[in-house]
Amino acid sequence: MDTFTRVHKMMRALLLLLGVVLVVGMLKTREVEGRKARKLDYFEYNAMSCRVHSACITEFGGVGDGTTSNTKAFQAAVAHLSQFESDGGSLLFVPAGKWLTGSFNLTSHFTLFLDRDAVLLASQVLEEWPLIDPLPSYGRGRDAAGGRYASLIFGSNLTDVIITGNNGTIDGQGETWWQKFHNGELKYTRPYLIEMMYSDTLQISNLTLVDSPSWNVHPVYSSNILIQGITITAPVNSPNTDGINPDSCTNTRIEDCYIVSGDDCVAVKSGWDEYGISFGMPTKQLVIRRLTCISPTSAVIALGSEMSGGIQDVRAEDIVAINSESGVRIKTGPGRGGFVKDIYVKGFTMHTMKWAFWMTGNYGSHPDDKYDPNALPMINNINYRDMVADNVLMSARLEGISGDPFTGICISNVSISLNAKPKKVQWTCTDVAGISSQVTPRTCDLLVEQGTEYATECQFPTDILPIDYVEIKTCSYYKRYL
């Protein structure tokens, strides 16, 4: 074989080898890209129900640039997905981006999922907030007589609805609304961020809610509700930015939430004066656990003041309060009617408080002049135990109603450390009755001290409510594109 032939064969061999290397490299690149694509195409999440069908908001013309209105896109997406209510349900995915939108309604057997870097921005255009009727148990709006603006995310008469995400954000952009409220410019009641009415089996979880125009989460006339892993923040001077307000609801669980609010972190409600009495739907079977709250001008947990349909069987435990006005506050007054009974609180830690305990029997604020001043509330069987507080101005302010005392109050195993300039009188009590055991500073005489020989542990139920039997599943979602 001559030299030319040998060189020619060597060149062919080198070219063949180079081709193999290039092909292998391309295959490897595609394999890596494929792995990346699969990671982006697929994720898992926890929910009460998994879905068969799914879509992304961009398929309906959604644009996440923070300036384009997506109200019609969300409305179209939900309308399209509603066809799958009886066919395994559906999920609407909101990817990373800033999605400006007005109010939109959800549908049954439906999941709204927000990506970690997704932000729903509440529109500042009033025309994107439809007006709806006042709640029948309130008779009028809370800000003004007459109707109210629909919530950003709204639903009525639904079953099996999940609003969740990978800690995505819902931004209410509430500053404009707060200014209108302070300036007396509102003709209708401000919208909430999330409201579900007359609905069953609800999950609201793993989201961050910021700067709501008013209340943040408001399930009303609903049952079987799980609210879990929610972070809520608003300026502490923002008006009525309550965190979570279960209202005439049954079988609700609120847990692992962090709330900074301009009002009560959790406010338990059931209607307002004669309208709530007539509607007659209590809030009952409510569990609140592992809540952290900062609310310098309001309560960590408020019972009322709109409690005319009744509040019963509330169980709160493992609560942390920081720089808040009061721990648990009962708010009511003549005209409210209804009841607050069978309340159980334990494992409460409080840092920097105005009052550790507060009960108010002279709360005003009526919907109109048609309320009955002789409709008196019944407050009974209120239990607080295993609580620690430090840097407290005043231990308790307990004020019942003359001729209608708050009864069956039990406070046990409570230690309160005072701040540098505490109130001289630590417990003020009028028109209340009950017992206390192992409480420092010592309680008022109306809460009869049991002494070490007859030390009493206040009640806390050991039975399990139905909402704690809810099974959480691991669900999967496959994106249709990158």
Image (cartoon, rainbow, N blue to C red):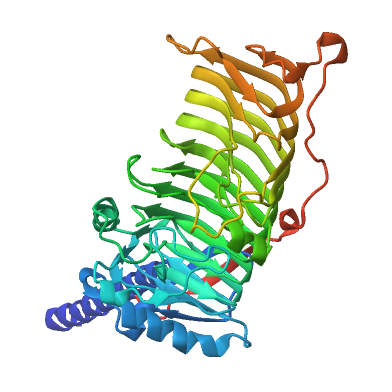
Outermost residue, left side: 4
| Residue 193 seen in render | yes
Q: Nearer the viewer, residue 437 or 201?
A: 437
Image location of residue 417, percent across then percent down: 55, 13
Q: Residue 468 placed where, x, y %? A: 73, 53
Q: Is residue 332 left or right of residue 100?
A: right
Along the line of sight, the residue nearer the viewer: 260 or 328? 328
State the residue in front, 4 or 143.
143
Q: Is residue 481 visible?
A: no
Task: Report the side of 228 relative to 434 (left or right).
Answer: left
x then y, percent, for residue 454: 87, 15
Q: Quadrant for the N terminus, please.
A: bottom left
How many marks can you see? 0
Task: Residue at 53% x, 80% y: name it.
Answer: 107
- Give the residue at x 56% y 87%: 84
Residue 57 lies left or right of residue 270; in this view the side is left
> Which quadrant holds residue 448?
top right
Question: Residue 392: where, in percent of width, then height?
Answer: 50, 18
For the point 51% across and 52% down, which residue is it? 244
The correct choice, above or below, for 264 with respect to 129 in the image is: above
Q: Residue 240, relative to residue 56: is it above or below?
A: above
- For the C terminus, the quadrant is bottom left
Q: Is residue 155 above or below residue 443?
A: below
